[in-house]
Amino acid sequence: MIEVYTDGAANGDPGQSGAGIYMKQGKSTFEYTIPLGILSNHEAEFFAVIKALEICKEQFPDEILSFRSDSKLVVETIEKRFTRNPKYMPLLEVILTETEHFPYFFIKWIPEKQNIHADKLSRQAIHLH
């Protein structure tokens, strides 16, 4: 099983944004900082999940994925498989399609203080532009 912590951040809303991804597999850890361009903070949170799924598909195919995010909006949207916001619908569709590549996909909301690694990485990604 892979534990995946994701966070998105934007400097402005919208503004330069980045994704931070922190993964744990047993005793191994992996860190990713990904600049995303001009996005809102919520969009960056969705893109962080998408980028993490892309990494998992490439590096950890067929693994059980346990995602964690401090974005209630993202977690609830994925759990309900629905959003009323037309801006987020295409992002949700990508996430749902990508999760089909794995035997099991779980996502759970966590408080910000439990997502410190991904938060730090997302803020670093903003400055990589």
Image: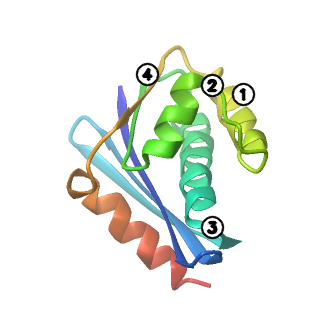
Q: CA distance from mark 1 to mark 3?
A: 23 Å
Which amino acid lies under the numbered mark 4 shown in the image of this protein?
Ile
Q: Is 14 on the left or on the right of 49, as rendered?
A: right
Which amino acid lies under the numbered mark 1 shown in the image of this protein?
Thr
Marks 2/4 in contact by CB < 8 Å: the verdict is no
Is residue 48 positioned above or below 50 on the image? below
At a point 40% along the width and 68% down the height, the residue shown is 121
Marks 3/4 in contact by CB < 8 Å: the verdict is no
- Closer to the observer: label 2 or label 4? 2
Question: Which quadrant would the N terminus be assigned to in this image?
Answer: top left
- Closer to the observer: label 1 or label 3? 3
Q: Which mark is residue 64?
A: 4
- Closer to the observer: label 3 or label 4? 3
Q: First in sequence: mark 3 or mark 2?
A: 3
Q: Which residue is mark 3?
A: 40
Q: Which residue is mark 2?
A: 81
Local packing at callout 4 (Cα closer than 10 Å; few below 14, some 14-19, many 20+) is some
Q: CA distance from mark 3 to mark 4?
A: 30 Å
